[in-house]
């Protein structure tokens, strides 16, 4: 299943499957992250993301998630959050590139 969903031509389907799984099965994680960033949401779902967030709040939000959830789930969520929402938060990109706890497939 993983190899099938990894195909570039199935990226839209993969995104929908991952998004649905996160919203249905990881809702507390989504809520914790958005609440820590002071982003208005409806049960972990956001209509409009801010162009920027406070770097300290972002770092604290990630540490909160890592303190409550397995790092593989946190990493998967943060990568999906960034990629599916086309988020351009430089600090998030840096953390995802440097923090080995959040790297996928490591």
Image (cartoon, rainbow, N blue to C red):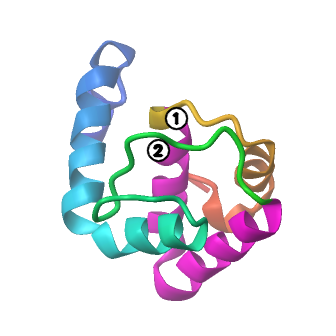
| Quarter of the image where the C terminus is located | bottom right
| Residue 54 image point, x, y percent | 77, 59
Q: Nearer the viewer, residue 2 or 22?
A: 22
Residue at the spot 34% in from the left edge and 61% down from the top edge: 44
| Magenta-highlighted residues | 55-83
**Which label number is shown at residue 67?**
none
The magenta stretch spans residue 76 = yes
Residue, disc 2: 80
Q: How many marks?
A: 2
Q: Can you identify the residue that label 1 sits on?
A: 83
Q: 90 or 100, which lies in front?
A: 90
Q: Is residue 68 left or right of residue 59?
A: left
Q: Dots 2 and 1: beta carbons under 8 Å? A: yes
Q: Which residue is nearer to you in this view: 37 or 20?
A: 37
Would you call the spot at circle 2 few (<14 residues within 10 Å), some (14-19), or many (20 or more)? some
Residue 66 quadrant: bottom right
**Secondary structure mostly taken by the magenta-highlighted segment of the chain:** helix
Q: Residue 47, located in which quarter of the rendered image? A: top left
- Asked whether, in this view, residue 11 is left or right of residue 4, the answer is right
Residue at (64, 70) in percent of width and height: 62
Q: Position of residue 3 (x, y in %)?
A: 31, 33
Seen at 28% across and 65% down, the residue is 43
Residue found 28% across the figure and 20% down from its top: 10
């Amino acid at each position: 299943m993983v190899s099938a969903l990894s195909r570039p031509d199935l990226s839209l389907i993969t995104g929908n499957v991952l998004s649905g799984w996160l919203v249905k099965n990881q809702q507390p994680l989504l809520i914790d992250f958005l609440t820590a960033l002071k982003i208005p949401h409806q049960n972990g779902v956001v209509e409009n993301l801010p162009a920027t967030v406070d770097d300290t709040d972002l770092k604290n939000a990630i540490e909160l998630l890592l303190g409550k959830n397995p790092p593989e789930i946190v990493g998967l969520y943060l990568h999906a959050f960034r990629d599916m929402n086309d988020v351009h938060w430089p600090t998030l990109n840096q953390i995802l590139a440097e923090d080995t706890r959040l790297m996928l497939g490591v």
